[in-house]
């Protein structure tokens, strides 16, 4: 009720509050704030015969009576046996009033009472100066004490008096202290109603009150409780007319310290009802109270009521707004103060400078700096420290240092401000140098100073300096302090010593939430994700409540785990502790779900956020990099720009990755333009993403231009450009780039090595691959799964299947990628039975297959002609392992059915596909039609391919070869004419091999090689030996309408035969011959190589566009089925 009245009253404007108080006087009804008291007491004003009766504001009965012109000698009068006008106090005891100057008064029952003073005692009996039973009472007035008991002034001449019932005479001390017994030897008195004895007045300062609730203090007996308020320390505050205001100020200060807004408002309401006229100090106390309790509206209302505002009241209001985070409002109030002509003091300037630092208003801060210099306030150390802090937070460290150095006096505050400025700016080494200068002074280091410099050591990753600070903390005994231990944990974590950080953490006696958070964050940032989550569980068991930073770190650690259920459990904790609306936690949750591919969950959290910053958008963009959802990335980027947000480095990187996945170079160029506008084109990370985007989109010229323009290149930049060369089949450039990288002393990582190994696989560069293998062994990166799988793939694609197999078997552990690599290698080398056997071993070891695994398995079934087993494996993709079949799986199944000659079943399978047939399906159909000579189905497939991709040369060549095999030369001419009109050119067949770390390339009918004569001579010699072994040229494989002699001559100079002859001329005996070809080997060359392996007694390995052929002792690994 009291607070509602005060709230309503204070919300009125000042003028209306005055009118309201005039028209409607406030009730004389006080709020009792003392303990063991009734909550309210009605105060009655009694005036009789110009006498005033005063009541105690904090007591329940009358305090004393003051009469006018009381005579020194009082005649004896007799009362009317209690029949007089009386007033009863708040606890039911009668308190009489003074009757003066009137000859007679009528009592409460109509009896006449003669004049002169009379009193009634504390239990309702008349104790008059002319006693009720004839006893005489001499001079001096009698007074009743503050709790309703008779405490009369000492009678100078009369040693005894008669008590209120006439039973005996009272001593002067009994009359003075209100006792009913005589003073005994132990100095004890009994109170006026016979309750507990009271202690001696002289030695013991407390007595028991009238209801026996507690003992009274001497001051209470002397002054009455009306003028006293008990303090927390057991003492009392005096309240007089002047001291009452001071008491209110102290009470408001106490309530402000305890943030007791409700109690303080009640006290303010009492001040209003009592008509207290505040002085300037009390007004400032009111403003400070409301400001510290966060009620700035009441603080401003109180300020508006001040009749004369001085600099102190203005400073109090400004400080209140700034302390609550309203820096701009504080600056506006300062302008208003200056507009009223009030000059600021040093406290005002320091406070407003803090507000400028808070809202980063450097311009106004500089104006204040001028005023500081003009007003000679610069000598104040707090003003100087505030200026240093302002310039530091506004990223003007040079100005901050100048101000610091020009300060006439520097204390620990100013040193700490500048130290913190260097640390916050990331200049840890500068902070350490400043700390060294501080060490030379006589200032004593505080825990705050040492914790600040520990942050500098952490940012500079200066372990040695951090250990020196640690030793200082040990010497001064502050190592286990919660404040400094957090700094030590953070420092050791950022220096990579998690074990030392954990030791410090465990030595902390009672680690708080900040210490737990520092340790969890350190483990998370150094890849120990599981340990971070386990430490969080221990924190929960200790009973501590995590904060938003703890949960953000735990969510980040869970994002890199493999257990989505664990992530959801932590998400539930976030909701439980009420941090689901925290931006940092929500951003971490979005990133977590995006890493797990739960795009819908991440988007749901993003949509539910009230305030989204650029980090929120970046977290959302991070989930749209893969091929399935990458199209959403540019849409989100556009929406981000529409909402007026400015993209940062991470925004551009995410969007460039989406463009790379989409292979959309035009959209990537638009993002490139945004990077240039944001002055991020030269940023190493953005530049790396640009190189990656252009390389994946096939625009290597643009990628090279950006790469060489970068002023700084790290290992990731080199890896990206090397990977770009490899993906565009420019292996030679990739190796040159790798060599340049090593010359610049850039150490390759596992991704660099795996990219280079893929380049070796593409160009079949065995020598380079073996060098990379040696490098991986020396650097300790051989056990990395990426490097190991790339090595197995390299050896397999260079024709060294035995080396690949032994490498796989030497691995201590293997994942799905490694198993896929070896299964696919077996399938490509014609070891299809071994491929299927390895697949069975993989399943028995509990390794789950993925989509790539089944492509290799289905390819093995196709090579072996296993239709039923192939169908079984295809069905298990979805039904057995829950994998959605891709178009590659369907193409493998089409190849299985087509190679087996089941064309009707193959067509039904295509018609029943869940996916729409694309170019890959029809190319497969065209390939099996060539094998079986099915012209009709081949024409159907070719017509579809001509519509899907009219520029694909393989469609025209396959159809032309089918027509040529059937002798339909007219149709061959039509197809070649169609190719010419479409601008499609046939890629010439070529073969290459590597000898002495040099690659030699041969074309059919090639006449450019420097050793051409030796090659032809060796080839004629070899042909005669093979012919003698039974070789007969098969001219049906010459798909040209020429004579048989020209066909035989054409066959004898195929590129793979030239490569074989060059190998026999150049290499030593008993060495495996490895030849690589860009087209499918023809049937005639296939027979030629089988016989050549017998004649030369060598193993000949040829890799064509589809698979490997191992020729040895007259047989091929493909079993003539390819």
Image (cartoon, rainbow, N blue to C red):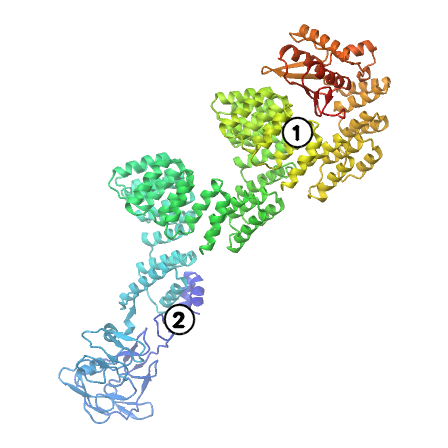
Identify the residue at image location x=27%, y=75%.
Answer: 216
- The reply to whether residue 399 is in sight is no
Residue 732 drawn above or below residue 37 = above
Q: Residues within 10 Å of mark 1 (few under 14, many from 20)?
A: many
| Residue at point 39%, 56% (across, down) | 291
Which residue occupies the foreground of this view, 868 or 744? 868
Q: Which residue is mark 1?
A: 825
Image height of 818 relative to 1013, above or below: below
> Secondary structure under badge 2?
loop
Q: Which residue is mark 2?
A: 26
- The mark found on residue 240 in the picture is none
**Can residue 19 be seen by looking at this rendering?**
yes
Which of the 4 image quarters holds residue 461?
top left
Please provide percent x and percent y for residue 669. Answer: 60, 29
Residue closer to the observer: 598 or 390: 598
Residue 155's spot in the image, x, y percent?
16, 82
The answer to whether 529 appears left or right of 414 in the picture is right
The spot of residue 684 in percent (x, y) is 50, 29
């Amino acid at each position: 009720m009291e607070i509602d009245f005060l709230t309503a009253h204070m919300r009125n404007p000042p003028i209306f509050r005055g009118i309201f108080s005039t028209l409607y006087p406030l009730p004389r009804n006080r709020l009792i704030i003392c303990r063991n008291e009734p909550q309210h007491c009605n105060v009655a004003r009694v005036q009789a015969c110009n006498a005033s009766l005063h009541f105690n504001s904090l007591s329940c009965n009358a305090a004393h009576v003051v009469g006018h012109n009381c005579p020194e000698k009082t005649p004896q009068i007799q009362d009317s046996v209690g029949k007089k006008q009386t007033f009863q106090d708040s606890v039911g005891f009668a308190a009489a009033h003074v009757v003066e100057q009137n000859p007679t008064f009528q009592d409460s029952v109509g009896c006449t009472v003669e004049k002169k003073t009379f009193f009634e005692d504390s239990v309702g009996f008349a104790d008059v100066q002319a006693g009720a039973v004839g006893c005489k009472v001499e001079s001096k007035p009698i007074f009743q004490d503050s709790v309703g008991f008779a405490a009369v002034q000492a009678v100078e001449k009369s040693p005894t008096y008669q008590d209120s019932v006439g039973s005996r005479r009272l001593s002067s001390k009994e009359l003075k202290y209100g006792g009913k017994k005589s003073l005994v030897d132990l100095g004890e008195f009994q109170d006026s109603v016979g309750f507990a004895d009271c202690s001696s007045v002289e030695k013991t300062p407390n007595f028991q009150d009238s209801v026996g609730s507690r003992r009274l203090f001497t001051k209470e007996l002397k002054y009455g409780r009306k003028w006293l308020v008990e303090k927390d320390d057991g003492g009392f505050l005096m309240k007089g007319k002047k001291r009452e205001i001071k008491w209110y100020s102290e009470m408001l200060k106490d309530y402000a310290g305890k943030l007791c807004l409700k109690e303080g408002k009640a006290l303010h309401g009492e001040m209003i009802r009592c008509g207290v006229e505040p002085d300037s100090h009390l007004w400032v106390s009111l403003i400070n109270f409301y400001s510290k309790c966060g009620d700035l509206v009441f603080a401003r209302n109180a300020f508006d009521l001040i009749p004369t505002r001085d600099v102190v009241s203005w400073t109090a209001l400004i400080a209140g707004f700034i302390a609550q985070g309203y820096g701009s409002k504080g600056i506006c109030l300062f302008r208003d103060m200056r507009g009223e002509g009030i000059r600021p003091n040093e406290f005002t300037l320091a406070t407003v400078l803090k507000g400028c630092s808070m809202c980063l208003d450097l311009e106004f801060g500089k104006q204040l700096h001028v005023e500081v210099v003009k007003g000679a306030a610069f000598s104040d150390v707090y003003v100087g420290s505030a200026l240093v802090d302002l310039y530091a937070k506004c990223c003007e460290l040079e100005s901050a240092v100048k101000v610091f150095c020009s300060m006439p006096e520097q204390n620990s505050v100013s040193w700490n401000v500048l130290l913190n400025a260097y640390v916050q700016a990331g200049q840890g080494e500068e902070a350490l140098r400043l700390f060294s200068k501080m060490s030379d002074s006589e200032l004593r280091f505080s825990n705050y100073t040492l914790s600040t410099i520990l942050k500098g050591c952490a940012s500079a990753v200066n372990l040695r300096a951090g250990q020196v600070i640690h030793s200082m903390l040990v010497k001064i005994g502050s190592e286990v302090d919660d404040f400094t231990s957090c700094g030590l944990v953070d420092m050791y974590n950022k220096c990579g010593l998690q074990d030392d950080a954990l030791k410090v953490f465990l030595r902390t006696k009672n680690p708080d939430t900040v210490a737990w958070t520092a340790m969890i964050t350190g483990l998370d940032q150094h890849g120990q994700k599981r340990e971070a989550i386990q430490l969080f569980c221990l924190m929960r068991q200790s009973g501590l409540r995590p904060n938003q930073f703890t949960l953000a770190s735990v969510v980040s650690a869970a994002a890199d785990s493999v257990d989505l259920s664990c992530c959801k459990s932590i998400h539930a904790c976030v909701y439980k502790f009420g941090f689901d609306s925290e931006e940092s936690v929500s951003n971490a949750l979005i990133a977590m779900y995006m890493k797990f591919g739960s795009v819908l969950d991440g988007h749901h959290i993003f949509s539910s956020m009230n305030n989204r910053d650029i980090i929120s958008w970046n977290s959302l963009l991070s989930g749209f990099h893969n091929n399935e959802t990458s199209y959403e990335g540019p849409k989100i980027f556009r929406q981000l720009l529409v909402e007026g947000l400015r993209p940062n480095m991470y925004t551009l990187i995410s969007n460039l990755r989406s463009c790379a996945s989409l292979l959309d170079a035009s959209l990537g160029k638009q993002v490139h333009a945004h990077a240039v506008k944001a002055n991020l084109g030269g940023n190493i990370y953005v530049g790396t993403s640009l190189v990656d985007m252009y390389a994946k989109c096939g625009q290597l010229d643009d990628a090279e231009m950006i790469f060489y323009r970068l002023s700084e290149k790290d290992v990731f930049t080199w890896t990206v450009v090397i990977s770009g060369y490899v993906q565009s089949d420019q292996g030679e450039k990739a190796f040159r780039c790798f060599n340049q990288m090593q010359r610049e002393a850039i150490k390759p990582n596992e991704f660099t090595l795996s990219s280079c190994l893929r380049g070796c696989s593409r160009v079949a560069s065995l020598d380079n691959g073996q060098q990379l293998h040696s490098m991986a062994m020396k650097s300790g990166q051989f056990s990395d799964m990426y490097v190991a799988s790339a090595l197995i793939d390299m050896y397999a694609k260079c024709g060294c299947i035995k080396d690949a197999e032994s490498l796989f078997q030497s691995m201590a552990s293997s994942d799905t990628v490694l198993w896929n690599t070896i299964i696919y290698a077996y399938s490509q080398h014609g070891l299809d039975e071994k491929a299927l056997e390895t697949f069975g071993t993989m399943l028995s070891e509990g390794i789950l297959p993925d989509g790539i695994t089944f492509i290799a398995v289905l390819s093995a079934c196709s090579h072996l002609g296993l239709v039923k087993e192939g169908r079984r494996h295809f069905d298990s993709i979805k039904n057995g392992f829950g994998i959605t079949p891709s178009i590659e799986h369907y193409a493998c199944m089409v190849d299985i059915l087509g190679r087996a000659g089941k064309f009707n079943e193959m067509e039904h399978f295509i018609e029943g596909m869940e996916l729409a047939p694309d170019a890959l399906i029809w190319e497969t159909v065209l390939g099996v039609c060539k094998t079986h000579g099915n012209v009709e189905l081949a024409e159907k497939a070719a017509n579809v391919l001509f519509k899907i991709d009219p520029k694909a040369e393989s469609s025209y060549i396959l159809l032309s070869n089918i027509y040529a095999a059937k002798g339909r030369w007219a149709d061959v001419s039509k197809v070649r004419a169609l190719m010419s009109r479409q601008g499609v050119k046939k890629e010439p067949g070529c073969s290459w091999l590597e000898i002495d770390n040099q690659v030699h390339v041969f074309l059919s009918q090639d006449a450019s090689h420097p050793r051409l004569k030796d090659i032809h001579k060796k080839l004629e010699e070899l042909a005669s030996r093979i012919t003698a072994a039974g070789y007969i040229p098969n001219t049906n494989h010459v798909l040209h309408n020429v004579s048989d002699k020209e066909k035989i001559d054409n066959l004898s100079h195929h590129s793979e035969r030239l490569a074989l002859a060059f190998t026999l001329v150049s290499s030593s005996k008993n060495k495996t011959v490895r030849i690589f070809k860009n087209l499918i080997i023809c049937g005639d060359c296939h027979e030629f190589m089988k016989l050549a392996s017998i004649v030369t007694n060598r193993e000949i390995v040829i890799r064509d566009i589809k698979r490997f052929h191992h020729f040895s002792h007259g047989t091929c690994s493909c079993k003539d089925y390819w």
